[in-house]
């Protein structure tokens, strides 16, 4: 295989969508809310939580593609509006994040209340039927609680004014922000998680292995388990990825690149072990490398490890 073929394969591999159980459940729930709004005008909200690399932004893109924008002379029809919350969100930057994808010609002009009026008008004018607010944990990242309550309160008033089903997507710590704000808590009581392991019928190891195998179908090389049987390979994939699709893909893409560069005919634990150290965690060797025979069989979530648990900030309660 030459380099051009390798890059083409890697690109195709990266673009592959897999409807793993949690992704499908979240997509179905969002589509269900959109259809309900379309049919009876009822706006139900939802929260989708997931660590980095679990597929939140991909889900937003997938839904936007499923309900594409239609361009018209007078005004575009935009069934799904995706808003990315900027880091350290303020009301002004939030308003701009709404107005820009809605096609407002001057998204940063006007007072706060005027911007909110324009957002509501454009949302109705563009016939928006679903609002996906990605990186929603940034609403609370400002650190000054007064400011973030103001953003949250402004958003709550805006959501009521728009009357369109809304989804907050964000890191698990988003839950603390919602819990701390009585008004948001009431509006966003339905929660879903995007990491693997939400499927009641299968264990997380089985799910990891299945995802690995379905992704493997779009690779030009065979996957071999080496010393590990399927069940054991599933366990090791789980520890190496923490159940996040981004990490499974990264390991596979890295292994493909090494295999092609070094002329191997298949991808196995030896290559995955090297990729884990080179691309996921450089300290991940020996007992700390999930593909090493001596692996310690535990989650790599302690301080300094790749899946370290980031505790939610303490947020003061307010009614
Ligand atoms: N359903 C999916 N099928 C295939 N690949 C996915 C899927 N969801 C996410 N990915 C891959 O995982 C990586 C991270 O996804 P992303 O949506 O950016 O995660 P998040 O927004 O939760 O941090 C991307 O490279 C993307 O290609
Ligand atoms: Mg994202």
Image: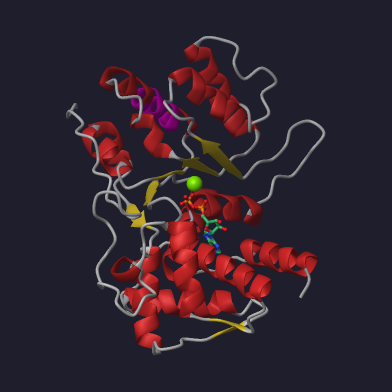
Q: Residue 57 in the image: state x and y as whole percent.
A: 52, 49
Q: Nearer the viewer, residue 114 or 173?
A: 173
Residues in magenta, as a range: 152-160
Q: Residue 230 in the image: state x and y as whole percent.
A: 40, 87
Q: Is residue 272 above or below residue 53?
A: below
Q: Is residue 109 above or below residue 43?
A: above
Q: Main secondary structure of the magenta part?
A: helix
Q: Residue 206 in the image: state x and y as whole percent.
A: 37, 80
Quadrant where the C terminus is found in the figure: top left
Outermost residue to the top? 111
| 159 magenta-colored | yes
| 157 magenta-colored | yes
Quadrant where the N terminus is found in the figure: bottom right
- Is any atom of residue 4 visible in this view? yes
Q: Please state if 98 lies on the left or on the right of 149 as rendered.
A: right
Q: Nearer the viewer, residue 245 or 111?
A: 245
Outermost residue to the right? 73
Residue at 46% over, 43% down: 165
Residue at 59% over, 65% down: 17
- Is any atom of residue 29 visible in this view? no
Q: Please state if 173 lies on the left or on the right of 154 as rendered.
A: left
Residue at 70% over, 45% down: 69
Q: Nearer the viewer, residue 68 or 61?
A: 61
**Total marks placed:** 0
Residue at 46% over, 88% down: 226
Q: Please state if 294 lies on the left or on the right of 28 as rendered.
A: left
Q: Tell me the quarter of the picture where residue 98 sits.
A: top right
């Amino acid at each position: 295989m030459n380099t051009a073929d390798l890059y083409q394969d890697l690109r195709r591999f990266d673009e592959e969508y897999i409807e793993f159980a949690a992704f499908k459940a979240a997509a179905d729930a969002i589509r269900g809310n959109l259809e309900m709004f379309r049919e009876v005008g009822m706006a139900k909200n939802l929260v989708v939580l997931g660590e980095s690399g679990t597929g939140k932004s991909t889900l937003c893109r997938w839904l936007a593609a499923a309900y594409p924008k239609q361009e018209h002379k007078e005004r575009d029809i935009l069934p799904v509006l995706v808003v990315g919350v900027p880091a350290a969100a303020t009301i002004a930057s939030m308003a701009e994040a709404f107005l820009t994808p809605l096609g407002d010609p001057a998204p940063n002009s006007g007072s706060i209340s005027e911007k909110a009026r324009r957002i509501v008008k454009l949302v109705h004018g563009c016939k928006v039927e679903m609002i996906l607010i990605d990186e929603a944990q940034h609403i609370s990242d400002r650190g000054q609680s007064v400011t973030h309550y103001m953003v949250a309160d402004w958003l709550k008033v805006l959501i009521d004014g728009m009357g369109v089903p809304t989804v907050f997507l964000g890191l698990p710590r988003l839950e603390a922000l919602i819990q701390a704000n009585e008004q948001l808590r009431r509006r966003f009581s339905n929660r879903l998680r995007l990491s693997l392991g939400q499927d009641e019928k299968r264990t997380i190891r089985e799910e990891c292995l299945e995802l690995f195998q379905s992704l493997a179908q779009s690779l030009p090389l065979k996957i071999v388990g080496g010393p590990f049987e399927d069940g054991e390979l599933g366990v090791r994939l789980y520890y190496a990825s923490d159940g996040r699709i981004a990490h499974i893909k990264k390991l596979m893409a890295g292994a493909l690149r090494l295999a092609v560069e070094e002329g191997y005919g298949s991808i196995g634990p030896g290559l995955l072990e090297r990729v884990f150290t080179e691309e996921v965690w450089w300290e991940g060797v020996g007992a700390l490398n999930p593909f090493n025979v001596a692996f310690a069989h535990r989650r790599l979530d302690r301080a300094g490890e790749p899946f370290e648990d980031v505790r939610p900030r303490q947020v003061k309660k307010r009614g």
